[in-house]
Amino acid sequence: MSASNSPAPDVIGIPTEPDVVALDPRRWAMFAVLLVGAFLPPLDFFIVNVALPSIQQDLGVSSSVEQLVISAYAGLYAVTLITGGRLGDLFGRERMFVVGLLGFALASMLCGLAWSPWALVSGRAIQGVTAAVMAPQALASVQASFSEKEKHLALSLYGAVFGLASVVGQALGGVLISLNVFGLGWRAIFLVNLPVAFLLIAFAVPLLRAPRARDPRKLDLVGAGLSVATLAALIIPLTEGREAGWPLWTWMSLAVVPILAGAFWRYEGTLARASGSPLLDPRALGAPGLARGLTIALLFYTISTFFLLFSVYLQQAVRLSALEAGLVFLPYGLGYLLGPLISPALRGVFGLTVTPLGMTLEAIALFGIAWLIGTTTPGAPPDQIWMVALLFLTGAGQGLATPGLMQMVTSRVSPAFSGMIAGVTGSTLQVSVALSVAVIGGVFYALGGARAGASQIAHAFVVTLLVIASSQLIGAGLGLTIARRPAPDPAHRSHPNNANI
């Protein structure tokens, strides 16, 4: 037991006497299982893109239902991440990981056996919810299970997972459909999750033996409901609004977001003061630097719009095929894989400034792509050598920034809140995706969009690149203000009584 009862200035928790817990010798084996599980949700987001034409032909899916195949998964994943993270805090991260993984496997089976468009949409919705239970546990375990020296390596591996998923998802989907394994066609992209999931569960049962919470509490169902309602009211209209022509319901939904958010915040504060177990404890969110860290995450993931609009530019302006356009992204994926792997070495030299350095590199590369496209004859492909180099640097910058950004956010609170903060971080990233697609994508389509001529598409894409690159630079500036703060002393972190690892 340590003797201190007060939290360090930069770390927020419930003031109780902290325990110094010996590191679990199985922690890296446990983390490997959690990491492979965390790979599945982003993989299933990317892998379905290449299968949509086959799904449409086989099931007779309309364009609106086709959109639901994507948005049902992404939307429900986004709005339930906070609840999923908090479930891990309350009932054991490893336990909830196994529950989420089993549910994800069963939902994947439903998708793979779907007999109608709506059966597929239902399966995708269940996939989204169960992925939100599973995914936050890996990020939360980094804060709760590793020493300070080990955390950056663990976060680097966590960041590399997303770079790998972005590359493997597109390629694996195309390979499985082309091979037509056992005559399954597009269904194989969902059924491939089953052997992976059941193999992980076989490893998880003996390895991931999480103790019960010392003071187990009930899930805050009212807070969970208000959280889901608030995020849904924000994300659904932002995701569907442009395609639907921004009808009245989208504006009404956005108008109630402040009301729902205010009700949620007041209820959580009341519950925390009454010594309850709120879904989102205001005391944790009051940690110095946390709000800035989440703002950086919001700016950081404006890069998500780049992938959507770059695909439009390549296929509509340069007239590449879908396969050719997909291959163009490979240098980015390789850079994203390399970035997290060299990040620990750079962290030893530059500390947390690796994150703003990575975002600055990303911004410079995006400005370079804007210059390259802007100086290329409309309709002609940009210089391949320059494009490969700039895409590689974009991915490397994002890969360098990701681990440090995750640490900036998660290290601000007690490990007992790590599941909650992992969920908040994931939801912030999803909100960033929805906002950037609506706002930056809106700028692109206002300037011409996909149906314009090659010159207009190129001009619109250059403008959006400048917006995205500027967002990265603003985020880098904010990152410097956090990186210069002294790191919290882990010996003084407070642990709530319901903490569990």
Image (cartoon, helix red, strand yellow):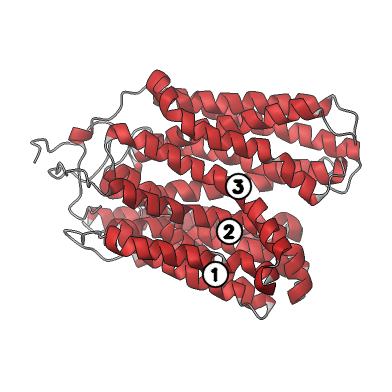
Provide the residue designation for mark 2.
44
- The picture quadrant where one finds residue 490 is top left
Q: How crowded is mark 2: few (under 14 residues within 10 Å), some or many (20 or more)?
A: many
- At mark 3, the secondary structure is helix
Amino acid type assigned to the residue bearing label 1 in the image: Ser
The reply to whether dot 1 and dot 2 touch (C-beta < 8 Å) is yes
Instruction: Check the image and report above or below for 283 versus 340.
Output: below
Element class at badge 2:
helix
Label drawn at residue 166: 3
Work out whether mark 1 precedes mark 3 in sequence or the reverse, and give the earlier one: 1
> Around disc 1, counting alpha carbons within 10 Å, would you say few (fewer than 14), some (14 to 19), or many (20 or more)?
many
Q: In this view, does 446 lie to the left or right of 207?
A: right
Is residue 3 placed above or below 425 in the rendered structure? Answer: above
- In this rendered view, identify the residue nearer to me: 73 or 445: 73
| Direction from residue 279 to residue 226 in the image, left or right | right
Cα distance in 3D space between marks 1 and 3: 19 Å
Q: What residue type is labelled 3?
A: Ser
Closest to the observer: 288 or 193?
Answer: 193
| SS for dot 1 | helix
Residue at image mark 1? 108
- Closer to the N terminus: mark 2 or mark 3? 2
